[in-house]
Image (cartoon, helix red, strand yellow):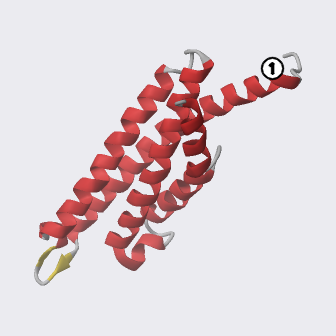
Amino acid sequence: MAISHGPEGLELLEEWRDRAVAAQAAEAAGLLERMVGDTVAYCKERKQFGQPIASFQALQHRMVDMHIEVEQVRAAAVLAACKLDAPARERARAASSAKVVVARACRFVGQNAVQLHGGMGMTDELAIGHCFKRATRIEQEHGSELWHAARLATLML
């Protein structure tokens, strides 16, 4: 591989960051799906006031919101992957859009999964604690949500 300098080097770095963001969006989709599945299963088992907490309407709404976030991440990941060979501006828009969606979903799903699991959600004994830590890392890797939102704003002009 030849070494690139100047504008060509920056373009190459941006392309590979976009590819990394697309790959990480796919990872996040699977990770968040696991978190939602584990949370729903736990809520079906955990009893409060003599009934599973999954029967409480407020918690059902929260789990549905978590599921919607996962579906948005999945759609953003597919779009980012489909645009990897598109022109640079189009590829960058898809990647940064995916990153913004993924970062928000990682925060929302992660925090809600931990809260619904209670204190056990942060322990190493349950997979949810490990998933939460990974989701927190994904939220910050390859540029923050704010950086990608600003990039997206400039690309939309």
Q: Quadrant of residue 36?
A: bottom left
Q: Is residue 155 left or right of residue 66?
A: right
Q: Amino acid at mark 1?
A: Glu
Query: Residue 119, position in %: x, y?
Result: 41, 79
Q: Is residue 74 left or right of residue 133?
A: left
- Seen at 61% across and 31% down, the residue is 18
Query: Count of labels shown?
Result: 1
Q: Is residue 48 left or right of residue 65?
A: left
* Front residue (pair 145, 121): 145
- Seen at 87% across and 24% down, the residue is 6
- Seen at 42% across and 28% down, the residue is 78
Query: Residue 73, position in %: x, y?
Result: 40, 41
Q: Quadrant of residue 63?
A: bottom left
Which residue was labeled with disc 1? 8
Query: Residue 112, position in %: x, y?
Result: 36, 65
Question: Relative to 6, is 73 above or below?
Answer: below
Which type of secondary structure does the marked residue at label 1 adopt?
A: helix
- Seen at 48% across and 61% down, the residue is 132
The quadrant of the picture occupied by the N terminus is top right
The quadrant of the picture occupied by the C terminus is top right
Specify few, some or many for label 1: CA neighbours under 10 Å numbering under 14, 14-19, or 20 or more. Answer: few
* Front residue (pair 41, 84): 84
Residue found at the very far bottom of the displayed protein:
49
* Front residue (pair 126, 134): 134
* Front residue (pair 82, 125): 82
